[in-house]
Image (cartoon, grey):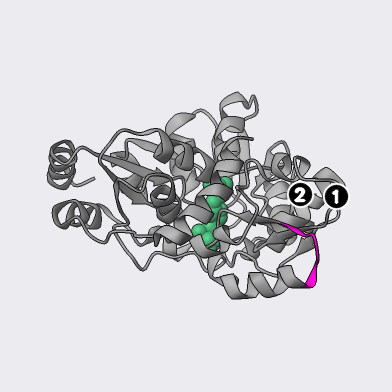
């Protein structure tokens, strides 16, 4: 860690009354200067609850946008505005409207990995941490359309026993994890448990012991009694796992599961964003109101 950069960030953060929040996949140097690190649900709750005037969001675009939806009076900075989520871009508001029109009476559940306008066109939002509870809370007599992640949707379908209409989106990073990777690791560490993210493909989830959000993986590791954990998600999570529970050995299912967008922010960009108060995330008020309703419904569950 660059001590000089860190000191400048800390000084400026206090001056501007800013809160730095980081997703569990961020670079170690970014996680280490954050006031709070967590999964999408935890970060949304933090963004809703803070009284800071500025939120520096170290994550990807939809996450910073969710913070702005919840806290319109605050300046929300995304230190690299190119940090997007390819899966969130796999459905547009227009496509959602067209799909909705095909299924009369449909209820739309959108994964938080979606744009503000897709959220505004949805009935309720969810994250990987609460998707099962959200779907269980829906009207049982009406169809449910789940967007954009077909694999999270598939996982929820199996957990709840409810039939869902699935949009064919996916995460390119989690798609890289295969059953063969799990088998190879299990052969090397036969006593280890295998945890994967529910964005993984169904055969990968079946081959694992648990499918959990990134926050769920961190909590699981805290209680874990074994020596080794095999982790199938974006490899940035290993930093926090090692930092919080160094007595366990963590082995990635594969080194290929790297999200280039989650790695775009570094300490230099965090400092620059605080100096210039840019790039700022803005959401048009009419879209924000609709998206807020979907996000608030989720936070009430
Ligand atoms: P979590 O909500 O589990 O942190 O996941 C976010 C994400 O983008 C997974 O790829
Ligand atoms: Fe999007 Fe996948 Fe990257 Fe998560 S890991 S931000 S879902 S591309």
What secondary structure is the stretch in magenta mostly built from?
A: loop
- Tell whether label 1 touches label 2 (CB within 8 Å): yes
Residue 258 in sight in this render: no
Q: Can you identify the residue that label 1 sits on?
A: 162
Residue 108 occupies which quadrant of the picture? Answer: bottom right
> At x 64% / y 24%, what residue is drawn?
225
Task: Give the distance between the C-alpha atoms of the residues marked 2 and 1, in whole angstroms.
Answer: 8 Å
Q: Which of the two residues, 209 or 59, is positioned nearer the viewer here?
A: 59
Q: Which of the two residues, 64 or 232, is positioned nearer the viewer here?
A: 64
Q: Can you identify the residue that label 2 sits on?
A: 156
Q: Is residue 8 left or right of residue 85?
A: left
Q: Secondary structure at mark 1?
A: loop
Please provide the residue range marked out in magenta: 102-107
- Measuring from the top left, give residue 191's x and y in whole percent: 72, 36
Q: Is residue 147 left or right of residue 25?
A: right
- Tell me if mark 2 has few (under 14), some (14-19) or many (20+) residues whose alpha carbon lies within 10 angstroms of its own: many
Q: Farthest residue toward the front?
A: 286
């Amino acid at each position: 860690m660059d001590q000089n950069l860190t000191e400048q960030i800390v000084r400026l953060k206090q001056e501007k009354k800013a809160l730095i929040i980081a997703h569990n996949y961020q670079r170690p140097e970014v996680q280490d200067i954050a006031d709070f690190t967590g999964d999408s649900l935890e970060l949304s709750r933090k963004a809703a609850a803070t009284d800071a005037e500025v939120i520096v969001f170290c994550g990807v675009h939809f996450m910073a946008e969710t913070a702005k939806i919840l806290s319109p009076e605050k300046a929300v900075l995304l230190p690299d505005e190119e940090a997007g989520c390819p899966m969130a871009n796999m459905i547009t508001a227009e496509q959602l409207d067209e799909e909705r029109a095909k299924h009369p009476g449909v209820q739309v559940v959108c994964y938080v990995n979606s744009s503000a306008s897709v959220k505004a066109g949805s009935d309720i939002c969810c994250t990987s941490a609460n998707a099962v509870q959200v779907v269980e809370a829906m009207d049982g007599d009406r169809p449910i359309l789940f967007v954009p992640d077909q694999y999270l949707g598939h996982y929820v379908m199996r957990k709840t026993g409810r039939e869902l209409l699935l949009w064919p989106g996916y995460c390119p990073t989690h798609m890289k994890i295969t059953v063969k990777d799990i088998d190879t690791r299990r052969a090397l560490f036969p006593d280890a448990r295998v945890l994967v993210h529910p964005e993984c493909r169904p055969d990968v989830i079946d081959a694992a012991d648990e499918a959990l959000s990134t926050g769920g993986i961190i909590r699981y590791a805290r209680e874990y009694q074994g020596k080794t954990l095999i982790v199938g998600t974006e490899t940035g999570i290993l930093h926090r796992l090692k930092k919080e529970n160094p007595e366990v050995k963590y082995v990635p299912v594969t080194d290929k599961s790297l999200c280039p967008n989650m790695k775009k922010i570094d300490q230099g960009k965090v400092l620059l964003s605080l100096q210039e108060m840019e790039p700022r995330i803005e959401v048009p008020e009419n879209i924000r109101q609709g998206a807020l309703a979907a996000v608030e419904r989720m936070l009430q569950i």
